[in-house]
Image (cartoon, rainbow, N blue to C red):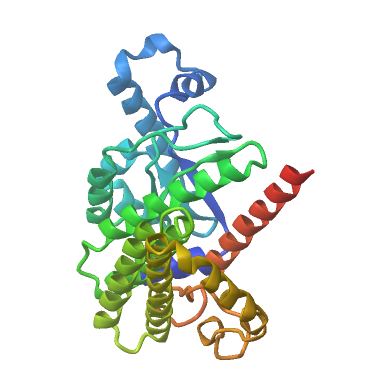
Amino acid sequence: MTNDRMMAQMSGKDGFIAALDQSGGSTPGALRLYGIPDSAYSGDAEMFKIVHQMRVRIMTAPAFTGAKVIAAILFEGTMDGEVRGKPASAFLWEERGVVPFVKVDKGLEPEKDGVQLMRSMPELDALLTRAVKLGVFGSKMRSVINLPSKEGIAAVVAQQFDVAAQSFGKAMKTDDLKLQQDNHYNLGNTQYRIGQKTEKANTQETIKTWEQAVQSYEAALKLKPVDADAKYNRDLVKRKLEKLKKQQQQQQNQDKNPQNNQDQKSDQDQNKDNNQQNQPKEDQNKSGEKKDQPNQQNGGSGQPDKQDQATKTVLEQAEVLSEQWAAA
């Protein structure tokens, strides 16, 4: 399958990723550097036409092949355009062996809490729909972290997961059943992570999001019943849901019966040592190592997704550093 070959190239091949996604804000300056003055065009339409011609020259250059360039990030207008009579994404993959991506963000918001979030993307669904039809492999978006701010980094992560969930949902609209299964699984993982962010502040919202995660894993299992990772993650989230619902019910009972709070606190203190010594089974993986996060898989293979683990490690390190600097 085409998607499998693209995935293999992105995950296992050395090379460069070409950035052909410059948007309108910085394009006039870039054109000036190539000797094209502002007077050479009138309005954005003509400007982007000139830029597309420049990108076509790059993509059709003899050296621009998958031997060195494993992928290219396309500006929306470039994705919608053609190269030698073919859609740009089709030309890149079929003629050059270059995996096509599309830039989806619309620039950055002003800095707040040491970070710059992405601007609102009201047309994201329409853009993703076109990208799927054109055979685009993935999307690119960016936020900027300027300072080790815990609140700012948390906002960036939350926004990225929200957009990821929207993107996976749109990617379901494909005839490739394996790709559908992968997307259901990845959507479940994303929904689980989103729910984690609200677990303390908004229990009901977490319950709602984790119930959606269970549904996503169920959908993945319908397409691939032998997917051990999807089954493990579904069961894990179900257990966490049951535990969270019990905690919510206990809290509601305490709110209604405040006279019982002291007795319940005493019971909790009495069992504190036992709780610390006995690790719940849901937090143990098959090898006996601590495991309190759903498995991540690459293309439903049953193996952990190395890229996802790397991303997770970066985020965890950022949060640890943020806490250390905040305490300094």
Q: Residue at x 63, y 57 (%)?
A: 314
Give coordinates of residue 6: x percent, y percent.
41, 65
From the viewer's perspective, is 245 left or right of 16? left
From the viewer's perspective, is 291 left or right of 159? right
Give coordinates of residue 83: x percent, y percent.
30, 43
Q: Quadrant of residue 113?
A: top right
Q: Residue 263 or 305: which is nearer the viewer?
A: 263
Q: Residue 93 or 3: which is nearer the viewer?
A: 3
Rendered position, 282 above or below 214: below
In the picture as drawn, the residue positioned furthest to the right comes out as 328
Q: Quadrant of the C terminus?
A: top right
Q: Quadrant of the N terminus?
A: bottom left
Q: Residue at x 44, y 32 (%)?
A: 107
Q: Residue 126 or 276: which is nearer the viewer?
A: 276
Rendered position, 269 above or below 34: below
**Total marks drawn?**
0
Taking the image as drawn, is residue 19 in sight?
Answer: yes
Give coordinates of residue 286: x percent, y percent.
55, 90
Give coordinates of residue 97: x percent, y percent.
41, 59
Q: Residue at x 57, y 70 (%)?
A: 265
Rendered position, 119 above or below 236: above
Q: Quadrant of residue 56?
A: top left
In the picture as drawn, the residue positioned furthest to the front comes out as 259
Q: Residue 60 or 294: which is nearer the viewer?
A: 294
Taking the image as drawn, is residue 9 in sight?
Answer: no
